[in-house]
Image (cartoon, grey):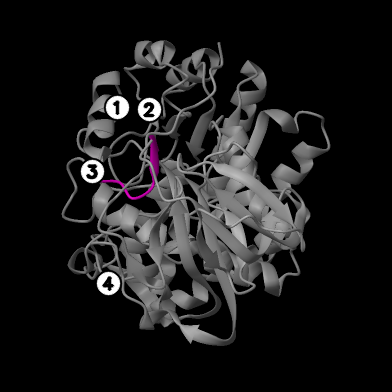
Amino acid sequence: MERCTPLAIVNAQLVNEGECYGGAVLVDSEGRIAQVIRGGAPVPTSGYRVMDAGGAYLFPGVIDTHVHFREPGLTQKGDIHTESAAAVAGGVTSFLDMPNTKPPTTDIAALQEKKRLAQGRAYANYGFYLGASTGNLEAIQRVDSREVPAIKLFMGSSTGSLQVTDSAALEQIFAQSPLPIAVHCETDAIIAKNLAEAKAKWGDEIPFTEHAAIRCSAGCLQSTRLAIGLALSHKAHLHILHISTKEEVEELQRLATTGAAGLVTAETCLHYLWFCNDDLSRLTWQLKCNPAIKYKEDRQALRTALRQGVFSTIGTDHAPHLEMEKKQNYALSPSGIPSIQYAFVGLLEVAEQENIPLPRVVELTAHTPARLFRIEERGYLREGYIADLVLVAREAKAYSVGSLPIYGRCGWSPYQGESFHYCVKTTIVGGIPVYQQGVLSENPCGQPLTFHSLY
């Protein structure tokens, strides 16, 4: 790891492992946390560069376990360099990238190529999923658990062509994967029927507000139930991605009463907690994503579930597309929202609105992602751990998100019209400040993530 100037972060509110307390953190020249100091205890600052937090919150850096950084093959939309810049501007210090690139990441050679592309170019630390397909069971079986966090399985179609719908193939994947399986749950047959009906009614002018009816709750729930059944049958660890519906929440709550919940964990995303289908009337193409953003009652059910501890992680599902692509008619407009720069501060807004304590937020964004995906030496403010940190202030007056520069390549986000109180002041990756007071470092220093072996 690159050597760095020893750093003393003082006068901070540390949010970590169930607590929020005043204190300081010392970071050594190896980029590791040398000492966590509570309260008014003396801080030995000799030999350290002192960073006065001014009472701001110091969190473990966000571990975003769900991004689409588009490299290789789709780099007109974004790449590892540009999207990781947006990540650190949003307090994200580590990311796990999805496999639906060109070519898809479905074998070891493709994984190694992604790592090569990230080296020296990623602002945040990086890891990559191996994608499941109908023909790569051998690659799944042979994967090194120290280098790959999980298998990504598309049970419904989205960007790319990795969906697996064959029942025999699904059984094999759940039966033989040595790693957790992160799943996109939607049912293509239901979506196709709804889309055909919408085309019959609207022709080429389907309103974007119909997206939630086309990619409907029933399509999500049917696929989610199928995935849960497969996981329980084969005792596989299932992580259900981007939960978007009230019905899926109810299914997870029911599962929690059976004693089998340990095999199944779930994620939701800020856009399902912040927006609802009504917002598509004004934001149209900007909010088209898969699964669709649903209705007010779904948003409230998701917020309640967040408060009750139903979700294990919050991902961004950062998925950039160019504005000219998105502005096409509904059928041609690709699905995906660029969100990573705003997701953490937006989540803090939701937490405040829903009276969710900050230590619970950190469980969702750092502690549990590190534990579920076996990420070594990150995700906590612990002595000896790598110093991936984010300093966030709560401003008395809300600021407009649109007043900030956008670091992602596509240059737009549906959050630009929103206002937040929380603001990322400094992001530190491996002991090195890479984003400070709105200024991005010129030297990306992200490192490959390592994962505890399962064998």
> What is the residue that sits farthest to the bottom in this orientation?
397
* Image-based side of 343 in relation to 117, left or right: right
Which residue, given by chain and number where applicable, does mark 1 sit on?
Answer: 111
Distance from the alpha carbon under mark 2 to that under mark 1: 7 Å
Q: Which of marks 1 and 3 is nearer the N terminus?
A: 3
Magenta span:
121-127
Secondary structure of residue under mark 1: helix
Q: Earlier in the sequence, mark 3 or mark 2?
A: 3
Question: On screen, 224 above or below 418?
Answer: above
Residue 276 drawn at (x, y percent):
54, 70
Identified at 64% across, 38% down, the residue is: 265
Crowding near pointer 3: few (<14 within 10 Å), some, many (20+)? many
Which residue, given by chain and number where applicable, does mark 3 sit on?
Answer: 71
Crowding near pointer 1: few (<14 within 10 Å), some, many (20+)? many
Distance from the alpha carbon under mark 3 to that under mark 4: 32 Å
Camera-side residue: 80 or 40? 40
Identified at 36% across, 74% down, the residue is: 284
Question: On screen, 192 above or below 299?
Answer: above
Q: Pointers 2 and 1 in contact (CB under 8 A)?
A: yes
Q: Nearer the viewer, mark 2 or mark 1?
A: 1
Q: Pointers 1 and 3 in contact (CB under 8 A)?
A: no
Identified at 78% across, 42% down, the residue is: 254
Secondary structure of residue under mark 2: strand
Quarter in which the C terminus is drawn: top right
The image quadrant that residue 378 belongs to is top right
* Amino acid type, label 1: Leu
Which residue, given by chain and number where applicable, does mark 2 sit on?
Answer: 130
Distance from the alpha carbon under mark 1 to that under mark 3: 11 Å
Distance from the alpha carbon under mark 3 to that under mark 2: 14 Å
